[in-house]
Image: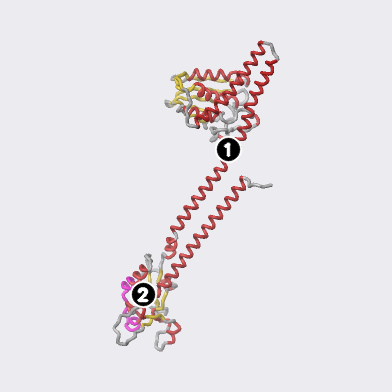
Amino acid sequence: MQRTLSYRGIILVASLALLGMMLVQANWIWTSYELKREDIHNELMKLAPEVTVQVKIAEDIVPKIMMEEGAFPDVRNMERIVDSVMQAAGFMEPVYFALHQKSSDSLYLSNTVSYEEELRASPYSTCMSCIVTYRFLSDSTEAVTPEMTSIRPISEMKRLPGYLPSEEFVWMSLYMPNQQLLSQRAILGLFMLSLLMMAILVYLFAHILNALSLQKKLGQMKDDFVNNLTHEFKTPLGAIRLASSVLRHSDNPAKRTTYLDLIANESKRLEEQVDRMLQLSTLDAGRDGLEKEELDLHHLLEEVVERLRPFLTKEKGKIDLQLTLQDTEIEVDRDHFGNCLYNLIDNAIKYGGVAPKVEVITRLKDATRQIIVRDQGPGIPLAHQDSIFDRFYRAQEDDRYKGKGFGIGLSYVKTIVEAHGAKVYLNRHYKKGCEFIIELT
């Protein structure tokens, strides 16, 4: 038998895959950074001898130091040479250099007063004393070029007769303070692109998880809707079937009238449920389908309350009408707006507890006409309050409320009310039960 992953299993596997991709991406970026840093290091290692040769040719530094006491090369000219070579190689960051010896009272000459320790320990150092020049003709007046120079190994220089000891050798060192920053800037574009792609992946992942969660929720709501719809239709259909069976075998006029009224009432109940769903489908399709007319709001409320009177009596409840609104003329679809009021009051009776007490209020507040339906029941839990107007959603899950609607009542109310240019909402601040408010324009 083929097994499929559960919803939580899918989330776990997808999360691990996304985390793995993020780790791979992070490792890739780090590797790119390390490679770029190594490239810069190798380039500086290559440039250090070239810079030293250029400075040596221009300044002839070693003979000056060896033969003329206190005769030092021009630091500004050396700086121009260093900058020229480094910029030609693509390095635009500040580069500092120093000429130094390793003896105790050694020479130290630099274009900066900082970084002496870093310059002396720099890996980008070249022995300037080891640079020798070759002339092919002793009387040649040809200018010295880098091709005419060579850097001998220190071991060979030590064997030359009369040459300075190694402690007196002159070294030229380079130091770039922003070398690490340069490596980071080099991969900044790659890093930002990777970050963008990961953000897109995380967003899509969250969107897919949300879609899966919504799909699961809709599936559960569909199952609940089918179950409740079956119960909602089965009860009146059973009553109609029973009444029709009795009518076939009864000649009593009073009994026939009673059962005919029962059939009529249950048929109307079924018709209202079907009409409600059809109206929602019509509005979803973008068609109004409302037949508006001028009528009196208070008269409409009284009609709705009268329709609910038998059910209210059965529940031993009470409705308190506080109709204080002066301007009661409204333009609405009598049937559908009346059904909205019916649903709100019906819910207040159903979920208002034992012997429900329902208040229906009309008033003017801040120049807005309000219709308020209030009960003294247990109220709607905070976790459900954001979803009560969603289609097929039912906040009450106790066995006490089974068979009391199938989750389209409040959705129907919201859809119809908004189709009239009004709005309906739950007053979250009311703590004695539920309070729904319709605000008319």
Residue with the mark numbered 1 = 218
The magenta stretch spans residue 67? yes
Q: Position of residue 420 (x, y in %)?
A: 46, 26
Q: Main secondary structure of the magenta part?
A: helix
Q: Position of residue 146 (x, y in %)?
A: 36, 78
Q: Which of label 2 and label 1 is nearer to you?
A: 1
Magenta segment boundaries in residue numbering? 63-80
Q: Position of residue 333 (x, y in %)?
A: 48, 22
Q: Residue furthest front?
A: 248
Q: Earlier in the sequence, mark 2 or mark 1?
A: 2
- Secondary structure beneath disc 2? strand
User: Left or right: 280 with respect to 230?
Assistant: left
Q: How many marks?
A: 2
Seen in the picture, residue 50 relative to 359 is either above or below; the reply is below
- Secondary structure beneath disc 1? helix
Q: Position of residue 156 (x, y in %)?
A: 44, 84
In the image, which disc is placed on residue 109? 2
